[in-house]
Amino acid sequence: MIKEAETLRKESFYRKYIRPIITHKVFSLVIILLALVVLFSIWSAAQGKQFFKASTLRNILNSIVLTSFLTIGAGMLLIAGDMDLSQAAVGAFGGIVLAASIVYWKLPWFVGIIICLLLCGVLGAINAIMVTRYRFPSFIATLAMMSMAKGLMYIFSTIGKGSDVASNIAVNNPYLNFIGKGTIGPVPFGIIVMLVFFLVYGILLTKTKIGLKIMLMGGNKAAANLAGINSKKILFALFVNASVLAGVAGIFSTGRLGQGSLLALQTNQFSGLTAAILGGISFGGGSGGMGGAFVGLLILNTFQIGMGVVGVNPYWVNVFSGVILLIALATDFISRRRLRSV
Amino acid sequence: MTKSLEFRGIGKSFPGVRALDNVSFRAEGGKVLALLGENGAGKSTLLKIMSGDLKADEGEVLLNGKKVEFPGPREAIEAGISVIYQERQLIPSMSVMENIFAGALPKTKLGLFDKRRLYNEATEIIRKFGLDIDPLEPVGQLNIAHQQMVEIMKAYRRNSDIIAFDEPTAPLTEKEIKILFELILKLKEEGKVVIYVSHRLAEIFQVTDEIVVLKDGKFVKTLKTSETTEAELIKAMVGRDIGDTYANLKRNDNIGDVVLEVDKLSNLVLKDVSFKLRRGEILGFAGLVGAGRTEVARAIFGVDPITSGEIRLEGKPVSFKNPGEAIRAGIALAPEDRKYEGLVMFRSIKDNVVMPVIDTLNKGIFVDKNELTKLANKAVEKYSIKTPTIDKKTSELSGGNQQKVILGRWTNEKMVTKVLILDEPTKGIDVGAKAEIYQTVCDLARQGIAVIYISSELTEVINLADNIVVMRRGRVTGIVPREEATEEKVLALAMRD
């Protein structure tokens, strides 16, 4: 009798604390991440190098800051069942707007940031209107926006310049320098902002009413609409959100580079989406979360940096990143098919 | 030798439903055979077995006296069977001639496709049918009637011996129907087996030679069209035993004031739909598929736009721009398609129950998990939903329990449901669970909720509803009180032109 109660308590401890962790999708992602770290540690040790140092950790975290803002925006949209391909272009546009407003328009740095985020938000609203009101497929609407935002970026880089030739805008502002390169204690400012954003969006998604609605409409938009969830309104907000977050990425990019660059964020669109999907956010919507997206980003960049440390030709890294995306997509489709057959 | 198609002892089951049970009959070349039955009688299932889309569990199909078995639609087509469904199976962007010859484009000696020969042969067929269609025109640009003609020509080109039509006249105008009938007679003269599925009795008398009546998946009888009457047909379709299920229901006999009044409601599908719904009343909606019953529900609920007419809720005119507004005013809709419109299948019972009331929960912008659990537990208890936990995904529940989750959603204590619209609530649900749902609906009526009950099962509507609105082609053709309702009467209103 006592023994029974004992096993019952053990079991309930297991059910309550252990099982939720190991059955959680993020858990398997963390395992993959650790496996990658072990792999690269052994590989580099075999070459007489050391992979895992405090600086490596910081490098990896630092390298995901820009992408993370795109991943959060893309992830929120994907969970709701939609996507945005224009984020990186919008972010680069925002970075140029910020540099131009400080250098050419002689505005204070914080006004520049506000203008940058506002204009990015407007572009996001245009995406949203195209998709929710005029029912363009978001793939096409945001592809068009990608081109428009690029064009606007070139145009804005010449406003107030006195020349029609677009170019990078060098900016040397102490506040922007801090945003880009400053540290609080030993930790770079960017990493702190990123972690706060992941936390806030994670809470938004799992603990709030709007988060529940996003998950439900991503799971079945028709049913959500018929149950009174205004999916158009939510989608509108999420498109604006994705673009404003892209603007944040643009601000960090300008701060880090010390210039509004016409080539900013070029490679981040792809890795932003890849990380979200890698982290268990499904293309079909309705599943995944911010924890997964964060670990997804870590996996992707650990992989890329690790390959660099062990000296693999960097061109191969791109090939392997593509392969990782394919694997992530394949597992997504397989698990969704399995769900459907239930 | 005359062509023929024979079914022997065909049986087919789906989870919870016996769709066909020991169906045997024979269709002969040079005759048009009608397949007649209510919704759910098994006509579509039979067509799908014929076309190789489904496999029969029991029995055999004999084509020209020889036993055949089709692994898929392709084999059925090759054997000479063409089924022309209501949904076109054409490629809209391709030309008429390419569609007619789809899968068998003529080739030149070099193996390239021979456009000239294709054009000539297509023109030949079009002329044979006496139609005015340009072989080069993309099919998507033709009107629906002509698209259907293309489909018939495709079947003709395949040299099919057996051609079946599923409700072919539904989208057609009078004039187009005439052309279709001429084509059918032509096919008949050529000695082909023509099978014609339709609800429209007038047409059946016009174009068919024999009638096979199905009911609840069973073969009832074969009749010669020239020797039967409309009344006899309806009786053959309907006459069935009604069990004790309905006799034992605890009904509501306390019907109150008018809650919802619909006055000359019109839109793309609906024409001047008017009716009144009272507190505690179950108002049945009967009619054939496509009669516009679902559209009435959608118009009231703010899903589809209204072009004219008025809806009054407790005397006040209302017009909802989206379902959210309708829900807040006290109207709820359980849609016909539970899987795609009702539930978010991969989310928990809990989440599905609270969907419409998320905004009214406590704790500001945050979700109060305890309150959520309480609401969901109450729903599980109230409707005795069989599940170990409220965290179970709704996709893992049976059809009956899924429907109860939806009922739980619309009657949770945060809702102010005055009008509950149920669209085919017992579709795909087994018999035992159906009886439970009936009692639940009666209980809700006893609590004062006004219920609109849309169903294609006549027995169900007649025995459950206090009054029955019968619709046909977007119009209300009659409102029948339960005391006067017989299946013959309702069916006649639903079918007569």
Image (cartoon, helix red, strand yellow):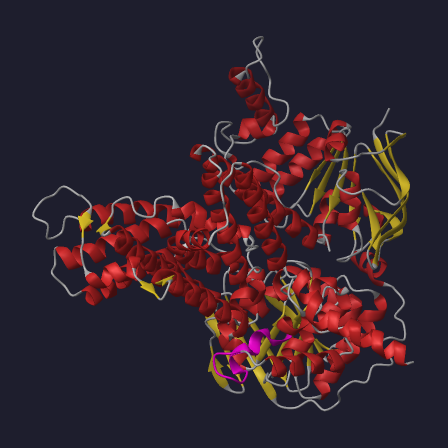
Establish if B494 lies above or below A296: below
Which portion, as a residue range, is magenta?
B353-366
Q: From the top left corner, tell me how far across and down residue B424 is, in percent.
A: 70, 66
Q: Is residue A103 left or right of residue B367?
A: left
Q: From the top left corner, tell me how far across and down residue B63 is, in percent.
A: 85, 31
Q: Is residue B480 left or right of residue B215?
A: left
Establish if A333 lies above or below A46: below
The one of B488 and B433 positioned closer to us in this rendering: B433
- Residue B363 belongs to magenta span: yes
- The residue shown at (79%, 32%) is B30
Q: Say whether residue B24 is visible.
A: yes
The one of A13 and B166 positioned closer to us in this rendering: A13
Residue positioned most to the top: B109
Q: Is residue A85 left or right of residue B427?
A: left
Q: Quadrant of the C terminus of chain B?
A: bottom right
Q: From the top left corner, tell me how far across and down residue B227 is, in percent.
A: 85, 49
